[in-house]
Amino acid sequence: MNKPEFLPHKTIAPRLTELPLVSVIIVNYNYGRFLWQAVTSVFQQTYSNFECIIIDNASADESADVLTRIEETYPDTIIIRRKENSGQSSASIEGYAASSGEYIVFLDADDCLLPDCLSTHIFVHLSLRIPVGFSSGDMLQSVGQRLVLGTVTGISDYIRSGKGRTECLLRRIDYASGNIWPLPSPDDDFEADVHFVPPENVTSWAWAPTSGNCFRRDALQLFLGNKRLQDLRSCTDAYLLRGIGSLMGSVLIDRAIAIYRLHGQNVFSKSPQLNGILIYERGTPSDNDLFARRLLIDYFIDNAALFMRKLPAQQTFLHVLKRLDAIDPKLPPAIPGCHSYLASKLVLSFNPIAQAIGTRSLIMTLLSMRVPPSVIIRAYCKHWPARLMKQVN
């Protein structure tokens, strides 16, 4: 019998690339009754290249027993037990530092992911023609175990507006040769369900809560370095989504890929969404959106030189700041004579901002923001000796 001819081009070639690693970071504080379901939803994903990291914020409920069970059942899980509860943002930063993924999902311990959540996010990111900072998928809303709503209003309001429809937004990764996408593909109509949110549209809330979002690691790295972020004990998503969205843009996925659970003890939402009705208590410690925006504006201004090196144009830096300042309700100004928080911060930081964007550009910006010339002159004269000494040295 003749031996079969060896044809190298007919042999099975190894995969050319691997799919990106997704780090799912779960911050838990006294949500032991929900934690097992959250973790199980991660390990039931159709997308297998992930790591699961749990940060326990010194829980005093049954969380310790649940964590032991998780360690026994899912031994690859990384569990970090904190000795004190220093808030959601601090725990998220620690989880990020322990992670390795190119993409990050922050899963609230009282929420859970639907099986195709990670694969949908990664399919979108690998197919996008615009490398945005994060994707945001729609979420079901439940009270306990019972579904109440099939969407969240931020995403639905933006999609209904039609502003996110963009021609040729995706080039489907599953159409690439070489078996790049080995998982089941979304249906042919999927592209119509992905909507672009450009940076200029961040003045309104267009996204899902924390658990519905998937971030590029590179995008998070720019914002988690804020030393004051740990002061934001809740509403970390407001800081990250508004900051990254105002700089790099985002996309919305008009398909439910996670479940937002209401149970009466949520930090922010107090009930399922109802048209025309607030679901949170305005002005309470859980309403941290104003503080998150103030942190963002301060962070951009304090690190103006860094962002000027990374942004394509000087005007981009100013546009980002103005977008954040335009969000309602407005932040109160920090000094008399200014009509906005941003204007007052630019006056107070006159010298470093002038060095970053130029004195003339800063003065023209302040005048356009209706800052009185007398206030600008005082700021200029106050910082003039420092600029002069720098030139002499």
Image (cartoon, rainbow, N blue to C red):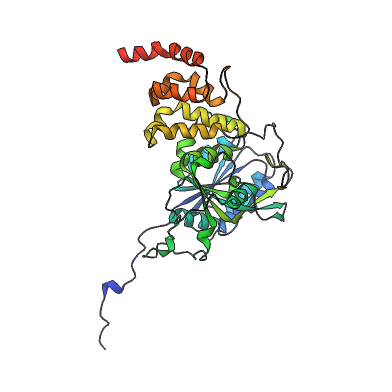
Across and down, in percent, residue 80 comes to 55, 41
Residue pushed farthest bottom?
1
Looking at the picture, how far across and down is residue 45, in whole percent? 55, 58
Residue 85 found in image quarter = top right
Q: Residue at x 45, y 39 (%)?
A: 221
| Residue 243 higher or lower than 189, as above or below | above
Residue at 62 percent of width and 36 percent of height: 234
- The image quarter containing residue 269 is top right
Q: Is residue 293 left or right of residue 388?
A: right
Judge whether 7 appears above or below 344 on screen.
Answer: below
Residue at the (42%, 19%) spot, across then down:
351
Q: Nearer the viewer, residue 92 or 117?
A: 117
Q: In which quadrant is the C terminus drawn?
A: top left
Q: Position of residue 232 (x, y in %)?
A: 59, 32
Instruction: Decide if residue 85 is on the left or right side of residue 23.
Output: right
Count of numbered labels shown in the rendering: 0
User: Quadrant location of the N terminus?
Assistant: bottom left
- Residue 74, x across and y down, in percent: 56, 54
Residue 11 in view (yes/no): yes
Most foreground residue, 28 or 105: 105
Residue 49 at least partly seen: no
Q: Quadrant of residue 278?
A: top right
